Amino acid sequence: MEDVRRHILKAGNAFCMMDPLGDMPPGAGYGVYLEDTRYMAHYVLSLGRAHLRLARSEVPTTYSARIDLLESRREREDPPSHIRREIILDSSFRDRVQMANLTSERRPFRPRLQFGVDFRDMFEVRGVVSRRRRAPRVKVVEDAVLWDRRGRDGVHRWTRLRFSPQPTELTAKSARWELVVPPRAAAEVDIELDFGVGEIPPSSPRESLDHLRRRAERRHLREMGKWSVFEVDDEDVANWMGRSLHDAVALLIDVQGHKVPAAGLPWYGTLFGRDSLIFGLETVAFHPRLSMEILRALAKLQGRGENPLRAEEPGKIHHELQRGELAGSGQIPFDPYYGTIDATPLFLCLLEEVYHWTGDREFCRELYPSAMAAGEFIERCMNRDPNGFLSYTGDEPPRLRHQGWKDSETAVLHRDGHEPSPPISLSEVQGYVYRGLSGLSDIARALGRRDDAERFGQGADSLRAKFHDAFWMSSRKAYAMAIDGEGERVELVTSNPGHLLASGILPRDRAARVVKRLMKDDILTGWGVRTMALGEPYYHPLSYHNGSVWPHDTAFVAWGMARAGFLEEAAELFHALLEAAGSFDFRLPELYGGFARDGSGGPVPIPQACDFQAWVAGAPFLLLRAFLGLEARASEARLDLRPYLPDPIGHLHIESLPVGQSLADLWVEGERSEAEVHVEWTKGPSLEVRLAHSG
């Protein structure tokens, strides 16, 4: 089943959201967007009084759509006309409407396009902020309509619609054509929407749709070529990985000269600290240069001073960067906003991974001041926390009360319903801190900073020593979701402790307890891991964070299980996500319902979920790495593997796996722990390969 409530196209920093007809009716957030601003809010095509029936609507690429419509009169009557819309988003939005007369007589066609522009900020579109605004200026010329507006942020934004052929009637709200089409012939209307900021450029000659398509394809393939290449013998796995890779490439945006992933579409088409770092951890083995760009971009935006309104502190990694009018004019504190507690330790985790995969000491020296600032922020925060953990106090709306990845208003409550007293320490965040400080210690040692290495290593060891007693719920045989400022545990069974498994903070016997708890039916649905266990006071299968399934969350848990040696359990989660992916045409959404799998259909979609998200696109690559036991030590000229192929994979080939200055091709054959691997170095020096058995 593919959900066709809407189509989303993405190109560069722009995206558009349409209904299956190719229209953008008012409401529901449809439109064309650039950098958190809507440049087209109303765009609806009709054909006189003809009733059009949808025959097919598809998105063959992340930047194009093809829609077939049939004119319908009476049931079982042959349709007299066929309308095809081909839409491409590149540097502009193009809509070619072909109207075919299928009869033996001349026929009139009266297409009409209604349109409107509002230049609304994404926060207004989402309903987070409401305000009165003046309408943009609009100017109508022979074959075009032009809107522009200078916002309170001083930015001049403009939109231009151009038409070919020239409309019979053109106003500030609609264009209409009177066309007569010979028998078994076709007419065509070409619509171009360009948009941007600054001075409005003069109209340029229209490029052909085929030229636009080829250019968009070249750009997309150029980015695809920077990744490792994957070949797998199971069609479903291949489809899931292939679509995820296309989505990962499509989500790239430019932020201050760095190519980084937007968090997700349609609502979060900008750089989020946590989301980009988790995506980096998921994909660093197969495209480490992209992770380096993520780290550089985040280092530029790292907190420099104290700003309580934006939750900014020195060394803190930001949560969300908004580039629309509201943020640019200071009406919302999101330029950027720093209300996240986990992005800063995750920054250190990804930096460590980049070092291990590239061995690039110069990059580490470049980022070392930012890494030290992050480590010092963590130290300061832990020193002022009454329990000695990394914690947050929370902000008032539209900022965030809760500042882990489960950041909705009701994501963290005590079982009796009362709010935890701040500051709040989340369990999974302590795992990120342990791994982040350990990684910073390793990097400091590699750069000859012995005092820093000892300092941060001791900090990690101290955290590990006190974590278990503080968070373990002996009566529930699970780790608590959080501890509040009074030292009281938030005694809910959730997926949060699953993220501890990959961090190294848990000894194996305690990791085994976490795995055992997560594999129970009250938290495992058959489609993935619930965010909150069935039976908890706030459980709801369609809640944003209190019972739904988030694919990236399940993938992180599976990664940790595999790293801790629980491969069969990790394989069960892999199967759950793979089969869920098949239900969504191999593009998993941000989240879906936490109903138990009962054999009657696929997982239940949740309407407010993003259609595709960076950390969801990265999930199959993290799982692949988890099952191969891929770990690099480029500075030691070594690649470690512990191959395990979960059903239904029997053959896997990875081409151009980057380790330091070398590239490797990997062939893995066999079943589960019997899988065997062959490695061939195709570029650079041959490195040591250490094989461990998964049995």
Image (spheres, helix red, strand yellow):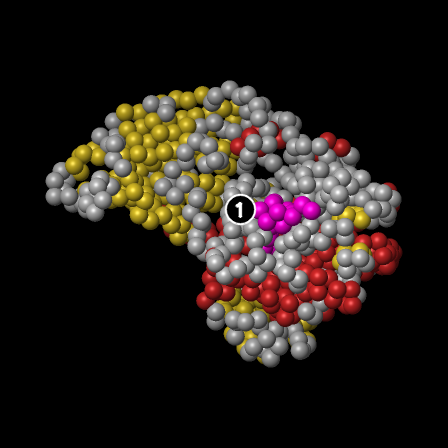
Q: Nearer the viewer, residue 449 or 73?
A: 73
In-image side of 274 versus 385 (left or right): left
Most distant residue in the left direction: 104
Which residue does the image show at 43% across and 44% down from the upper left? 5
**Quadrant assignment for the C terminus:** bottom right
Residue 469 visible within the image? yes
Q: Quadrant of residue 326?
A: top right
Query: Magenta stretch containing residue 540, yes or no?
Result: yes
Mark 1, residue position: 606
Q: How many numbered callouts? A: 1
Q: Please name the amino acid that badge 1 sits on.
A: Ile
Residue 558's x, y, as percent?
64, 62
In-image side of 292 versus 27 (left or right): right
Which residue does the image show at 15% across and 43% down from the upper left? 103
Label 1 SS = loop
Which residue does the image show at 71% across and 37% down from the upper left? 401
Q: Nearer the viewer, residue 434 or 292?
A: 434
Residue 109's x, y, as percent?
22, 35
Residue 210 visible within the image? no
Is the residue 420 above or below the residue 198 in the image? below
Residue 643's x, y, as percent?
62, 74
**Quadrant assignment for the N terminus:** bottom left
Q: Nearer the viewer, residue 93 or 574?
A: 574
Residues rendered magenta in the picture = 537-552
